[in-house]
Image: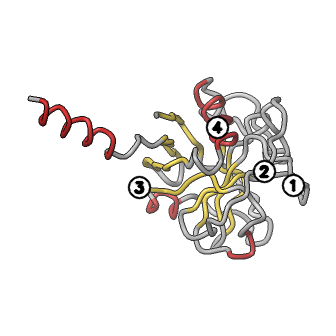
Amino acid sequence: MLMRNLVAAFALMAAPAMATEMTIEVEGYANGTITIDLLEDVAPGHVARLKEIADAGRYDGVAFHRVIEGFMAQTGDVQFGNTNANYDARRAGTGSSGLADLTQEFSDINFDRGVVGMARKGNSVDTANSQFFIMFQEGAFLNGQYTVIGTVTNGMDIVDQIKRGHPRTGAITGKPDVMKKVTITE
């Protein structure tokens, strides 16, 4: 009996910790679910912010407002990007959550295909807030410049279908794809 209890205890200790997972239901030109493993051990402040916004339902209905072929798809502007409330295509991407900006949590994780990073205001380092982007392909020029918050573990085919914007600016013409529902589980 003692041996069985010891084996069970060691098995529990050896089991990997449950990951924090973000699930995004996408609707529009692309339709389906994207699953992201959030890296709370790499960027705990940023992951906590995403969870706070998602738990409040504030990401639901938010547009993919900047999508550049061969680069990335950006979303998360809860101020001007919500297609259910106050969507403003001209201002989408300039808003925030109303919460304080975050201090960057840089890592040595490379911006490869499927990596998710936090957007920020221009070149100002500590201005990440609510917006994030998913890489279509590798972008080494971003390495060490933006906080990596996760990686797509399922649904990269859905990411690849997101409606593309202007080749240079990424601005979407017409109806954008949206995050219909965003949930984060631990």
Q: Quadrant of residue 163?
A: bottom right
Disc 3 is placed on an element classified as: strand
State the image coordinates of residue 162 (x, y, percent, origin top left): 56, 58
Residue identified by numbered label 3: 154
Of callouts 1 and 4, which one flags the residue occurring earlier in the amino acid sequence? 4
- Between residue 16 and residue 165, name the one nearer to us: 16
Badge 4 crowding class, 10 Å Cα cut-off, few under 14, some 14 to 19, many 20 or more, is many
Of callouts 2 and 3, which one flags the residue occurring earlier in the amino acid sequence? 2
Of callouts 2 and 1, which one flags the residue occurring earlier in the amino acid sequence? 2
Badge 1 crowding class, 10 Å Cα cut-off, few under 14, some 14 to 19, many 20 or more, is some
The residue positioned 41% from the left and 55% from the top of the image is 154
The residue positioned 65% from the left and 50% from the top of the image is 64
18 to the left or right of 108: left
Q: Amino acid at mark 2?
A: Gln
Disc 1 is placed on an element classified as: loop
The residue positioned 71% from the left and 52% from the top of the image is 118
Q: CA distance from mark 1 to mark 4?
A: 18 Å
Q: CA distance from mark 2 to mark 4?
A: 14 Å
Q: Which mark is residue 50?
A: 4
Q: Amino acid at mark 3?
A: Asn
Residue identified by numbered label 1: 125
State the image coordinates of residue 129 (x, y, percent, origin top left): 78, 41
Residue identified by numbered label 2: 104
Q: Nearer the viewer, mark 1 or mark 4?
A: 1
Q: Nearer the viewer, mark 1 or mark 3?
A: 1
Badge 3 crowding class, 10 Å Cα cut-off, few under 14, some 14 to 19, many 20 or more, is some
